[in-house]
Amino acid sequence: MKKQAIILSAIAGIAMLSAVSAKNNDPIVMTIGGKDIHQSEFEYLYTKNNLQQLAPQTLDEYVDMFVVYKLKVAEAEAAGIHLTDEFRKEFEGYCIELSKPYLTDSLTNKRLVDEAYARMGKSRLVSHIMLPLGSTFDEKEKNRQRLDSIRNAIVNGGADFGEMAMRFSADRSAVQNKGSMGYINANRFPYPFEYAAYTTPVGQISSVIDDAPYGFHIIKVEDERPNPGKVEARHILKLTAGLSPEEAEKKKAAIDSIYTVLKNGGDFDAIARAESEDPGSAANGGRLGVFGQGEMVKEFEETSFSLKEGEISEPFKTSYGYHIVQTLAYHGIGSLDKELPTIQAVIKRDMRSTMPEKERMDQLKQSFGLKIDSVALFGLKERMAAANDVKGAFDIALNAKDAIATLDGKSISAAEISASIPENVRNGANDAFTVFYSGLNNYLDDATAKAAREALMRDNSEYRNLISEYRDGILLFEISNRNIWDRSSSDVDGLKDFFAKNRGKYTWDKPHYKGYVIFASSDSVATAAQSYLGSTKVENDSLVDRLRDKFGRDIKVERVVTAKGDNAIVDNIAFNGEKPQAPGRWVSWFPYEGRVIDAPEEATDVKGAVTSDYQQELEQRWVKSLHSKYKVKINKKALKNIKATK
């Protein structure tokens, strides 16, 4: 029996909820073990059960099953299962997982898809200046403010963007290109960078981008043009990287000769295979596949996009060497349906994947009235900075009663935030306040999500019923495991007694071999094992260990109860069948303590069937005892109203 069979089907039913659960009037339909069951919960489970059944149950049939279900849950609660750490951890995990659909802004993903597709139609010419993020809170603030000052010097002080990029940008290519990145396309850069590049008006400079993963940026947008899409091309390359001027000149002469041959009708595919020094494409006739802007070095990209379809370029040089390129075809931007898989893949692998949750979280923080006391926060920062070391700084925070934030009407102290930061994270910190500040954001996210789940339990019948179903499902599994499944597999005496009382139920339609088959890796090992067993008294329960001690991994023992015709080896040793092909390395085998029987002799001969039947008997006994132990009161009038609506 699997736990998933009891509880995991609930996700599929999240959108299948009964309209009755939304009614203000929610009468009690039954009371089991002193616990009231309301109509909304009962009808939710009844509706879902019938949606999952090939043959829907009548209400009366379902009532009987439901009562048994709730009796078992009552027994689990009486056993204290819901109070164990194991249960709490598992249940909390389900609560978090099941709340996610409610804590996600469903419109955000559509907006991001539409936004990405719209941007795919445009290319923007941009330059940037980047400063490093810094490793501490103070370093980050210092670099962010410094870049803001650089921006101000350009926007209001008349400084030249390119000159400032050469002087200050952490992107050292700015020394050569003055920060220019050429024309860029959507879905090629971290989302915060792309967002600024596509929302800053042409001719203007963005604000400081402070949430990109690799640094702080400002972007100057210089031009916008339609995106030509992608180009399909092939090339021939003569490498010059690392060569002397004389050797490079020979490569130039070689590429010029190839160009002459091509102009006179030479086969591009054959020449590329024979002459190109690009190992990645030469074997494929120089084909590079389809690529867009920003995916190749500048000179190669410009040449490829400047040619007409089928046109061959003159030789040109890049940092790799001399090329001849032929543009084979242009591929424009497809329809949204065609581009959607690519867009979704890009969104999934960058920070946009978390934006539906983040935007919803921001909405929830606002609705729960989140306020951060910046005065208290930076007062704590100063006290932590005055400590002698990181440990001392955290000791200050761990004992600080300052109310740093307020959420859902509750104050959150610095001590609470600090205590939520794992000890190993605190011990490994280089800057205490940076870790504290990160912990503050994590704490507020967790506290907001918790408050939202509490509100859902209070106000949302869909979520409340779903959580109740999962809670009861976990309890049902654990209590059933104790009373039925584990017990039936471990209760040897119970199985024996049950088999003895019901022996007539278990019959075979043909004889079975019952005993051991001993496999050996060679005939000599088999002979030695037979001799050993013939001269030494070995109890069956120690047979495996004794033979393994004596013969190591050259012996394998299997206990079997197998019918004629079901196993070729058993047929060979017990029913005069032909010797089959050896199974792997086990080239020899012989029977031990075996005989042919016409009917089962003990429970282990038909263990699967006996165990299943024994479980049913245990279930019947258990349910009978539960009915005796817990009082069940049915509100027939309320059930009649449910029946009338069906």
Image: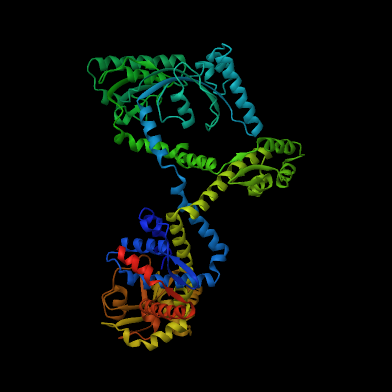
Residue 429 appears anywhere in the view? yes
Residue at 57% of width from left, 65% of height from top? 84
Farthest residue to the left: give it.
Answer: 265
Q: Does 194 sit above or below residue 126?
A: below
Residue 480 appears anywhere in the view? no
The image quadrant that residue 224 belongs to is top left
The image quadrant that residue 570 belongs to is bottom left
Q: 635 or 493, which is in the foreground?
A: 635
Q: How many dots with numbers?
A: 0
Quadrant in which the C terminus appears? bottom left
Residue at 28% of width from left, 80% of height from top? 575
The colour scheme used to paint the residues is rainbow
Q: 423 or 580, which is in the foreground?
A: 423
Q: Does 38 sit above or below residue 258?
A: below
Q: Residue 504: image x %, image y %?
A: 32, 87
Q: 500 or 628, which is in the foreground?
A: 628
Residue at 58% of width from left, 46% of height from top? 408
Q: Residue 440: image x %, image y %?
A: 62, 42
Residue at 74% of width from left, 44% of height from top? 396
The image quadrant that residue 118 belongs to is top left
Q: Residue 415: image x %, image y %?
A: 69, 47
Quadrant in which the N terminus appears? bottom left
Q: Residue 163: image x %, image y %?
A: 55, 13
